[in-house]
Image: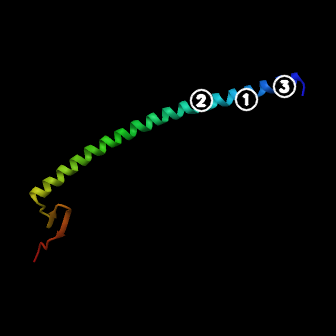
Amino acid sequence: MDAGWALILSAVVTAVGGVIVTVIGRFRKENKEDHAIATGMLRHIFHSIGRVESKVDKHLDWHHMKGLDNGREVDDNGIKKDKKVFE
C-alpha cells in the first residue's frame, strides 16, 4: 500500500469514526432527557402515593376508633370476621 492510499484510508476511518461518535452523543443527550422526564414522573407518583397512603391510614384509624356498622369487627390487622347481623 502506498502513502496515498494509506492517507485516504485513514481519512475515511476518521470520518466514519466521527459520524459514529456524533450519533452516539445525540443518543446520550436524548437518553438523559428521557431519564429526566421519567424521574420527574416517578417522583410525582411517589408523592401522590404517599398522600393517598396517609389518607387511607387516617380513614382506617377512624374506622378502628368508631367501629364499622356493616356487621364486621376490626382488629389491628384489618377486618377480623363478619358478625351475624340477623340471628
Amino acid at circle 3: Ala
Secondary structure of the residue carrying numbered label 2: helix
Q: CA distance from mark 3 to mark 2?
A: 28 Å
Identified by mark 2, the residue type is Gly
10 Å crowding of disc 2: few (<14), some (14-19), many (20+): few
Question: Closer to the camera, 13 or 3?
Answer: 3
Q: CA distance from mark 1 to mark 2?
A: 14 Å
Residue, disc 3: 6
Q: Nearer the viewer, residue 83 or 1?
A: 1
Query: Of callouts 3 and 1, which one flags the residue occurring earlier in the amino acid sequence?
Result: 3
Residue 86's image quarter? bottom left
Q: Which mark is residue 16?
A: 1
Residue 87 is situated, as x and y percent measured from the top left of the image, at: 10, 77
Location of residue 36 (image quadrant): top left
Residue 15: x and y in percent read 73, 25
Q: How many marks?
A: 3
Residue to which mark 2 is pinned: 25
**Quarter of image, res 46:** top left
- Disc 1 residue type? Val
Q: Nearer the viewer, mark 3 or mark 2?
A: 3
Q: Kindly indicate whether the residue at mark 1 contacts the one at mark 3 (C-beta within 8 angstroms).
A: no
Q: Which residue is farthest right?
A: 2
Q: Is residue 40 left or right of residue 48?
A: right
